[in-house]
Amino acid sequence: MDGDGDDRWGDVPTDVLWEILRRLPEISGRRRVRLVCRRWLDVVDEIEPEVQRRRAKPLPFFKNGCYEHPSAFFLDDLAGECDVRSLFPEDVDDDRDISDRYNEDDMVGSCNGLLCFWIDRHYSGGCGVFVINPVTGETLHIPSPPPETLATSRSSRAGTLSFGYHPTTGKYKIVHFPSNGGLVDDVSLGNTTSTAASSSSSSASRHGGHGGGVVNVLTLGDDTGGGGAWWRAVEAPPWTLCSAWGVVSVDGATYWVNNGREIMSFDLEHERVAAVAPLPAMSKCRLPVSMAKKDACCQLTDVGGRLGVSIAIHRRNSICIEVWILEGRGDKQSWSQWGTIQGLQPSQKIGRPYFAYGKCVLTNIYRQVFDDRLNNIVYRHLPCSLKGGSILSRAIEGMPVAKFKTRELRMFSYIETREPLNIYKEEEEESSSSSLEEEEEEEEEDEEEEEEEEEEEEEEEEEEEEEEEEEEEEEAVVF
């Protein structure tokens, strides 16, 4: 079929094409449709982000302390009644010792309905990275990234993880940015790990670590070396990572900010590090370690499938948030202002790393009520325009949709999917099944040997009994 000359779908309305794509079997089905012809390739690439955006729902995540289990919830029907559902089973009484309950479990990110968690229970075991599909209940266990060589590291989980997807290759990748000690303020992990650092520590270590030209990458389902997917060390120019400003994977790349206020990218297809077109508005942002109350606070975010930067400017009695989005690719990159959110209360924040869900904007504000309980209230705002101009928003005008007992709250985006995970662990299952077969064969051989030994022992006992009977008969004859 000549894709360039095929115009049979030219008169089909976009809404009809959107409905067709929406009914296809999840991500893999739409990926196969791209191969039909050039027309379908262009249509899928153009409409797929819109399909994802319309289906996306908020997923708040938080964790209170190292002895509590993480909590995550789905917010269904955000524009309506907003039903809150828990991702994890309801809490049950945990009678384990306090040392066994210690954990640093955290959420790395969400991608096409798959959720990635970094589990660290180094007192009770169970460390590693897990990718789960809440709809199918499937879980994919991935080994932890290569261990840090820090003698002062108190945790097996060091550095920063990111979970991303490349729409053209259809591959999921987990990227690990190692740290070299100092103060590791890891927003993507929701944790701060302090190690012994001298007063002469470099700016790189004070802002999240300095990579020695290596980024660790794992591709789900990659079995080129045999034995299942494994971490690969990818050479990269020396980099620094200010993780307090966030790490975001969007549109086939992973983005972060270095200690020079530059936005860097890691291409998930070609696995190369490059600088992004500079955003002049970031010049007003100070690095978090020296940020005062009135300073602007910068955060990377995902705005409708594109890289966004939110800059919070503190005013006398309110906060103004500027949101910028990255347009184009390569040498044609440029920044445009998505909008300005004005009138927020001093302690009110937009969702991080996600805040825009369709026509809804989510903010959250932390309040400590009289009985010392922690209340983090999520507000829904329906601005008149989502692009250009200013969005006037008062907390009192926002509709409260959920309340959580936590101080820190992160917002992810989630879509329900039946995308299978077993295709990424066939090799693992085959190897495990073969090992089970070998164990069963060994057990059968051991059982046969034991039976033979028992038979020999029984024969020896019978011979001894016969000899004793003969001796008794001889003695009886003598008497």
Image (cartoon, rainbow, N blue to C red):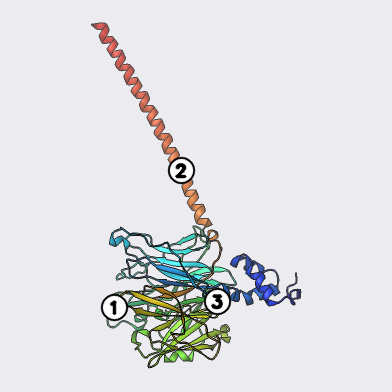
Q: Secondary structure at mark 3?
A: loop
Residue 203 picture location, percent across and down:
35, 84
Q: Camera-side residue: 93 or 188?
A: 93
**Which residue, given by chain and number where applicable, does mark 2 sit on?**
440
- The amino acid at mark 1 is Ala
Can you tell which mark lies on residue 251?
Answer: 3
Of the image marks 3 and 2, the number of the one nearer the N terminus: 3
Count neighbours of disc 1 (C-alpha within 10 A) and say few if under 14, some if 14 to 19, many if 20 or more.
some
Q: Camera-side residue: 197 or 101?
A: 101
Count neighbours of disc 2 (C-alpha within 10 A) and say few if under 14, some if 14 to 19, many if 20 or more.
few
- Mark 3 or 2: in front is 3
Residue 45 picture location, percent across and down:
63, 75
- Seen in the image, is 257 located left or right of residue 19? left
Count neighbours of disc 3 (C-alpha within 10 A) and say few if under 14, some if 14 to 19, many if 20 or more.
some
- Seen in the image, is 217 located left or right of residue 155? right
**Which residue, given by chain and number where applicable, does mark 1 sit on?**
197
- Picture quadrant of residue 43: bottom right
- The amino acid at mark 3 is Asp
The number of discs equals: 3
What's the distance in space between the residues labelled 1 and 3, CA to CA? 37 Å
Task: Name the residue at the bottom extreme.
Answer: 316
- The amino acid at mark 2 is Glu
Of the 4 image quadrants, the one containing the N terminus is: bottom right
Q: Are marks 2 and 1 in contact (CB under 8 Å)?
A: no
